[in-house]
Image: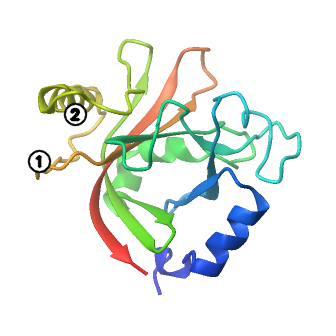
């Protein structure tokens, strides 16, 4: 059994998580990292910076979807999390910057109610505020394609991007702890949807 097959958010588990925290939106899992967490969404990006999933004060906070995202159907779902020294939250996201890891795995899994979404990483880099990766929706195909092209140009590696005409990506973001503005950025494209 593969690592991702061990993680399945069934209907009853989704309901239990939603009852525990009404801001629960999805579950994210990245094989080969410690990233295997519920993800919340609030009206403000500050709400979960230092509040955990149980509503308790915690310096690690929670993984959360950007407040600029209006729907899970937005073209670009943006997920933020702290780069924790104990490797919790997005503390292992930087592993995705290493070619030896990416050669083993380029998959990210998102679990929604009744669905498992499989994404494939197409760009990884450290952003120094010279590019805005936090754009949830695009007015035209040209705007979306320009964003994809810029993301690919920024990437440390040529990971491939298959343009199938669909606009469904996710962007993961965490600080590097090097400077206040630097962020580790990971972009991935939706490649399959499995209904539970």
Q: Earlier in the sequence, mark 2 or mark 1?
A: 2
Up the image or down, 78 lies above or below 9; here it is above
* 78 left or right, relative to 163: right
Mark 1: few/some/many CA within 10 Å (<14, 14-19, 20+): few
Up the image or down, 89 lies above or below 146; here it is below
Per the rendering, the mark at residue 81 is none
* 91 left or right, relative to 67: right
Residue to which mark 1 is pinned: 163
Residue drawn at (28%, 67%) of the image: 192
Place residue 190 in its image quadrant.
bottom left
**Circle 1 SS class:** loop
Q: Disc 2, disc 1: CB below 8 Å?
A: yes
Disc 2 to disc 1, how far (Cα)?
Answer: 10 Å
Residue 84 at what x, y percent from top left? Answer: 71, 39
Up the image or down, 170 lies above or below 151; here it is below
Residue drawn at (70%, 44%) of the image: 62
Residue 73 at what x, y percent from top left? Answer: 37, 49
Residue to which mark 2 is pinned: 148
Q: Which is more toward the observer, 77 or 172? A: 77
Q: Quadrant of the C terminus?
A: bottom left
């Amino acid at each position: 059994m593969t690592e991702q097959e061990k993680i399945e958010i069934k209907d009853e588990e989704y309901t239990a998580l939603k009852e525990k925290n009404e801001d629960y939106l999805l579950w994210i899992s990245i094989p080969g990292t410690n990233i295997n967490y519920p993800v919340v969404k609030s009206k403000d990006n500050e709400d979960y910076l230092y509040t955990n999933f149980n509503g308790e004060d915690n310096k690690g906070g929670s993984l959360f979807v950007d407040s600029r995202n209006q729907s899970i159907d937005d073209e670009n779902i943006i997920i933020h999390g702290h780069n924790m020294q104990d490797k919790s939250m997005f503390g292992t996201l930087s592993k995705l910057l290493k070619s030896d890891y990416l050669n083993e795995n380029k998959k990210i899994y998102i679990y929604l109610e009744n669905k498992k979404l499989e994404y494939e990483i197409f760009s990884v880099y450290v952003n120094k505020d010279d590019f805005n990766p936090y754009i949830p929706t695009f007015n035209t195909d040209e705007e979306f394609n320009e964003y994809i092209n810029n993301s690919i140009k920024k990437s440390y590696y040529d990971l491939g991007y298959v343009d199938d005409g669909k606009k469904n990506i996710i962007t993961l973001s965490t600080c590097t702890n090097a400077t206040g503005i630097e962020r580790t950025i990971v972009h991935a494209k939706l490649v399959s949807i499995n209904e539970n």
